[in-house]
Structures are given as structure tokens and as C-alpha cells.
Image: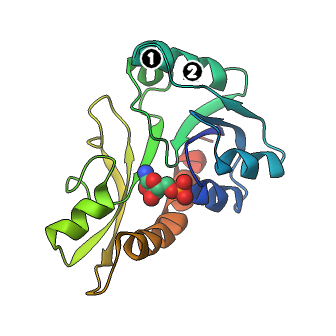
């Protein structure tokens, strides 16, 4: 049961995954990013699929990049492009995401800033199955993170990420274990 990881950014969640013995066989990015360097440093094959064309066509190219790496489970780790039907057809119920809020609150790309702006006292992170309905798939795990009075988006996101780094690999472990 191998995992393909999709990334766009710094790759701290990827790093947390790679720090375990989870079987990651490929890392695919939609842009040049630090996460790719991290994957390469771990000797993991990488691919860049630049955005362009429509999203369905882009999604086909992502699926093509995962092909050939024995991928059974796709883990989005800070992947910032919305994917369309082809990936859900290729990996039904097996595209997983981590989102930096307690869904269904604060969907979208600015979840931490939105939580802070809303003045909530508690936010957190959610590991969920990805579906065509963005940030709305079945929830696999959640953990709360208190919002502190002097929090900035950066400080709050850092603490949310600390939790993601712990619970995302745990969930992936459960899913990988469950299928063997
Ligand atoms: C994470 O907080 C993830 O939930 C969000 O983007 C962030 C990615 O961080 N979608 P990193 O690239 O894993 O450091």
C-alpha cells in the first residue's frame, strides 16, 4: 500500500510523513517548491505538474504523474490546486487532505487568517477524505488548538501545524495498515 504525496509549499507535513516509515513512493507538486527539495533529499522520485489548461486536464496530468509508482493512497499535504473528478475516479475514497481548521468551519485557502479574524477562541486541524466538494469530505480526525490573545496568523498556523504533523501521519498509518 504505497502513498503519493501532493505538495505546493514548504513541505513541513511532507517532512512529518517522511520522518515515519510510511511508504511514500512519489511526491508531485504543482510548482517548484521547498517540499520537492525535501523529497529529493529523501531519495523519493518527484514530478512537477505546472498549472495550466482547465482543471480537469490538469487533474489528468496529476493522475498521470502518480501512475507507475504503485500508489494506492494520495495524501495532499499543503497542495493548493483544486482537483477534479479524474483523481476521485482513479483513487475512490483514497485521496486524503489536511486542512488547518476544524471543518466545517473556515473552509478555503485562508483558514487560519479567517479563524483569527472571526475571533474564535479555539480552532484546529482536520484530516479528511477529499471529495469534489472542496473541504467537505468525511472527517477522519480532528484536534483543537486554542487561539491565544496575542496570536498572529503565523504563530497560530505554526501551532496548528505542530498538531497536523502528529495526527496526519497517524491517520495515514491507520489507512495504510487497514488495507494490508
Ligand atoms: C498546512 O497547514 C495545510 O493544512 C495547509 O497548508 C499547510 C501546508 O504546510 N493546507 P506545509 O507545506 O506542509 O508546511
Task: Using residue 165 as the reference point, say whether residue 114 is left or right of it.
Answer: left
Please report the residue visible at 30 percent of the width from the left and 56 percent of the height from the top: 111
In the rendered structure, the answer to whether residue 39 lies left or right of residue 77 reads: right
* Residue 99, above or below 66: below
Residue 75 horizontal/vertical position (percent)? 53, 43
Marks 1 and 2: in contact by CB < 8 Å?
yes
Return the residue nearer the eye: 126 or 40. Answer: 40
Q: Where is residue 88? Give x, y as percent.
A: 42, 24
Q: If the image is split into quadrants, where does the N terminus sit?
A: top right
- Vertical side of 167 occupied by 14: above or below: above
Q: Quadrant of residue 89?
A: top left
Whether residue 42 appears in this view of the structure is no
The residue identified by callout 1 is 86
Name, please, the residue furthest toward the bottom. 149
Q: Is residue 44 visible?
A: yes
> For numbered disc 2, what is the local secondary structure?
helix
Callout 2 environment at 10 Å: few (<14), some (14 to 19), or many (20+)? some
Residue 179 is situated, as x and y percent measured from the top left of the image, at: 57, 40
Residues at marks 2 and 1, CA–CA distance in whole angstroms: 7 Å
> Element under label 1?
helix
**167 relative to 28, above or below:** below
Q: Could you classify mark 1 by the number of other residues whose Cα lies within 10 Å: few (under 14), some (14-19), or many (20 or more)?
A: some
User: Which residue position holds label 2?
Assistant: 63
User: Mark 2 vs mark 1: which is more N-terminal?
Assistant: 2
Where is residue 168 drawn, in percent x and y? 50, 58
Q: Nearer the viewer, residue 40 or 50?
A: 50
* Mark 2 CB lies closer than 8 A to ligand 1: no
Amino acid at each position: 500500500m504505497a502513498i503519493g504525496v501532493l505538495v505546493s509549499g514548504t513541505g513541513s507535513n511532507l517532512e512529518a510523513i517522511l520522518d515515519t516509515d510510511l511508504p511514500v513512493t512519489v511526491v508531485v507538486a504543482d510548482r517548484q517548491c521547498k517540499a520537492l527539495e525535501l523529497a529529493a533529499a529523501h531519495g523519493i522520485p518527484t514530478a512537477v505538474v505546472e498549472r495550466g489548461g482547465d482543471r480537469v486536464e490538469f487533474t489528468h496530468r496529476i493522475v498521470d504523474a502518480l501512475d507507475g509508482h504503485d500508489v494506492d493512497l494520495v495524501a495532499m499535504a499543503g497542495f493548493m490546486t483544486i482537483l477534479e473528478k479524474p483523481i476521485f475516479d482513479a483513487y475512490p475514497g483514497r485521496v486524503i487532505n489536511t486542512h488547518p481548521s476544524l471543518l466545517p468551519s473556515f473552509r478555503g485557502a485562508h483558514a487560519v487568517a479567517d479563524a483569527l479574524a472571526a475571533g474564535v477562541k479555539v480552532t484546529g486541524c482536520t484530516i479528511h477524505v477529499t471529495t469534489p466538494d472542496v473541504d467537505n469530505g468525511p472527517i477522519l480526525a480532528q484536534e483543537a488548538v486554542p487561539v491565544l490573545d496575542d496570536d498572529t496568523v503565523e504563530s497560530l498556523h505554526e501551532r496548528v501545524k505542530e498538531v497536523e504533523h502528529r495526527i496526519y501521519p497517524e491517520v495515514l498509518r491507520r489507512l495504510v495498515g487497514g488495507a494490508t
